[in-house]
């Protein structure tokens, strides 16, 4: 039956299969990834009826506000289309039960004051934490300094970490007990990283808060994985074919993985029943994912866009892009432990990247490339140099990004001003490398290697040959 002669159901309260669960999880960063991943795992947990999510947007204004309005109109319900290589499965996700703007600091604090609130999760992008190269809050960032001034005078902050800090202060004062913070962005040891940064913010509030955070707040590290493109207009068609009107659907791949490491002192959903795994050591798993999946994504975005590809699937079919990724992977796998079975992981990745029905736009992945390269590629180059090898595969990836910045124009980047400054320097190549890693920029041999790849820019040989 076609959508036109099928009765279409709007997503309203009547579409809920079970009563809305009580709010026990607070999320910051109401994007597609949260809705395909943590919200999906929570909806599929065996105790889902006890765990509702109150979700806040990740930043004020922009498309997030429009999405927030529609989500509220849909009683916080939305559809998730799981898109395999040949077919779709559409389901209604009901784990989000309240939605707010990040500017609603009062609502955030009110949730944290309740003892029943057990977890704060975040998906605000790597750059959204506004950390410097040492993992400290970037005090030179005007938004961070404004937040600090606001915290010192008892106000709420406008950024995720400042908001978490005021929320924790509200919880401490309310005597609401311990809580877990669970950052779900692509950063190594994300729990420990965020812990350090929150303690720095807390030190701007009071010594009591620092002590309370140290003893009462658990920071959980996690590796999250599910390829989820940003919303595009055609995404509404899948739910319509299933008879559902949804203005803010999410489309995702069949694969999903969630590996967690840490304690939840106020409880947590039984996420294992939905497939999540717990480990004592997150490092092998998050390193594998950050280097192999995310590193390859950033490489494909840089070279693929320059060679005329628009999506991951089309770049994957370009032999020049594939060999860039293979060269980088061959260096990365040397520094991963055998038990994570990197060869198999890489084979599976090509299959996931190749899914022709997932339109994962390279432009989306290319955003914030300078920060992403620091996390995904620079550590491999450093490990190779430390082992007295050339790191040529990693150099080629960095060079692909530098070529984009030099010849094609950069994409949206939280460090746009620094990139523009680097371009004004006498040696822009070295300055751009320094933005990604100062240590790498100090290695003269590595800089020359990158420079050689910049000169041999493979995207320039594309005209008339391999237009992906
Ligand atoms: C991507 C990730 O946009 C990006 O930088 O590499 O969002 C990637 O799709 C996810 O981490 C997959 O789990």
Image (cartoon, rainbow, N blue to C red):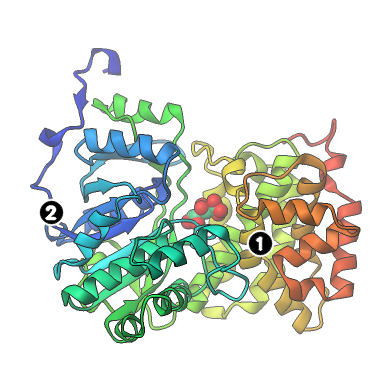
User: Which quadrant is the C terminus positioned in?
Assistant: top right
Quarter of image, res 435: bottom right
- Indicate which disc residue 373 carries: 1
What residue sits 43% from the left and 46% below the top? Answer: 253
Left or right of 251, for residue 94: left
Residue farthest left in this picture: 19
Left or right of 164, for residue 110: left
Measured from the top left, where is residue 320 in percent x and y? Answer: 77, 48
Looking at the image, is 126 positioned above or below residue 205?
above
Left or right of 155, for residue 77: left
Looking at the image, is 64 positioned above or below residue 1?
below
Q: Earlier in the sequence, mark 1 or mark 2?
A: 2
Quarter of image, res 89: top left
Q: Are marks 1 and 2 in contact (CB under 8 Å)?
A: no
Tally of numbered tags: 2
Measured from the top left, where is residue 316 in percent x and y? Answer: 65, 46
Q: Answer whether residue 90 is visible to the viewer in this image.
A: no
- Indicate which disc residue 421 carries: none
What residue sits 60% from the left and 69% below the top? Answer: 132
Looking at the image, is 23 positioned above or below residue 319?
below
Q: CA distance from mark 1 to mark 2?
A: 39 Å
Q: Nearer the viewer, residue 64 or 221?
A: 64
> In this figure, which residue is indicated by the disc labeled 2?
21
What residue sits 74% from the left and 46% below the top? Answer: 319
Q: Is mark 1 within 8 Å of ligand 1?
A: no
Q: Is mark 2 within 8 Å of ligand 1?
A: no
Measured from the top left, where is residue 192 in percent x and y? Answer: 45, 78
Neighbourhood count class around disc 1 (C-alpha, 10 Å): few under 14, some 14–19, many 20 upward: many
């Amino acid at each position: 039956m076609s959508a036109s002669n099928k009765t279409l159901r709007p997503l309203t309260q009547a579409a809920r299969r079970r009563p809305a669960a009580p709010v026990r999880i607070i999320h910051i960063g109401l994007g597609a990834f949260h809705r395909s991943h943590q919200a999906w795992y929570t909806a599929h947990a065996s105790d889902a009826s006890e765990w509702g999510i109150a979700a806040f947007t990740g930043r004020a204004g922009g498309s997030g506000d429009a999405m927030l309005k529609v989500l509220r109109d849909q009683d916080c319900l939305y559809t998730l289309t799981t898109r395999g290589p040949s077919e779709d499965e559409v389901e209604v996700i009901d784990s989000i039960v309240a939605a707010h703007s990040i500017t609603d600091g009062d609502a955030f604090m009110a949730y944290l004051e309740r003892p029943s609130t057990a977890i704060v999760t975040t998906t605000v992008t790597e750059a959204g934490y506004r950390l410097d190269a040492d993992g400290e809050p970037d005090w030179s960032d005007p938004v961070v300094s404004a937040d600090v001034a606001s915290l010192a005078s008892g106000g709420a902050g406008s950024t995720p970490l400042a908001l978490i800090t005021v929320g924790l202060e509200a919880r401490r004062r309310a005597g609401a007990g311990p809580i877990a913070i669970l950052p779900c962005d692509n950063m190594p040891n994300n729990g420990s990283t965020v812990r350090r940064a929150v303690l720095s913010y807390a030190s701007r509030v009071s010594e009591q808060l620092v002590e309370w955070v140290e003893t009462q707040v658990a920071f959980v590290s996690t590796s999250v994985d599910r390829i989820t493109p940003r919303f595009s207009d055609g995404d509404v068609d899948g739910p319509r074919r299933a008879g559902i009107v949804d203005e803010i659907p999410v489309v995702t791949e069949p694969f999903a993985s969630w590996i967690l490491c840490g304690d939840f002192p106020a409880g947590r959903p039984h996420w294992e029943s939905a497939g999540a795994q717990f480990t004592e050591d997150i490092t092998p798993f998050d390193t594998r994912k950050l280097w192999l999946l995310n590193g390859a994504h950033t490489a494909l975005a840089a070279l693929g866009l320059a060679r005329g590809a628009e999506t991951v699937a089309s770049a994957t079919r370009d032999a020049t892009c594939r060999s860039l990724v293979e060269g980088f992977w061959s260096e990365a796998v040397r520094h991963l432990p055998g038990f994570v079975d990197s060869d198999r992981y890489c084979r599976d990745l090509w299959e996931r990247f190749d899914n022709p029905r997932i339109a994962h736009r390279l432009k989306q992945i290319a955003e914030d490339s300078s920060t992403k390269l620091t996390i995904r590629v620079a550590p491999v180059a450093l490990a190779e140099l430390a082992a007295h090898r050339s790191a040529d595969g990693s150099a080629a990836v960095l060079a692909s990004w530098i070529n984009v910045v030099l010849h094609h124009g950069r994409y949206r980047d939280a460090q746009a001003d620094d990139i523009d400054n680097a371009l004004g320097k006498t040696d822009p190549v070295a300055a751009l490398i320094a933005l990604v890693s100062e240590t790498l920029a100090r290695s003269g041999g590595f800089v020359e290697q990158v420079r050689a790849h910049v000169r041999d820019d493979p995207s320039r040989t594309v005209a008339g040959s391999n237009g992906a």
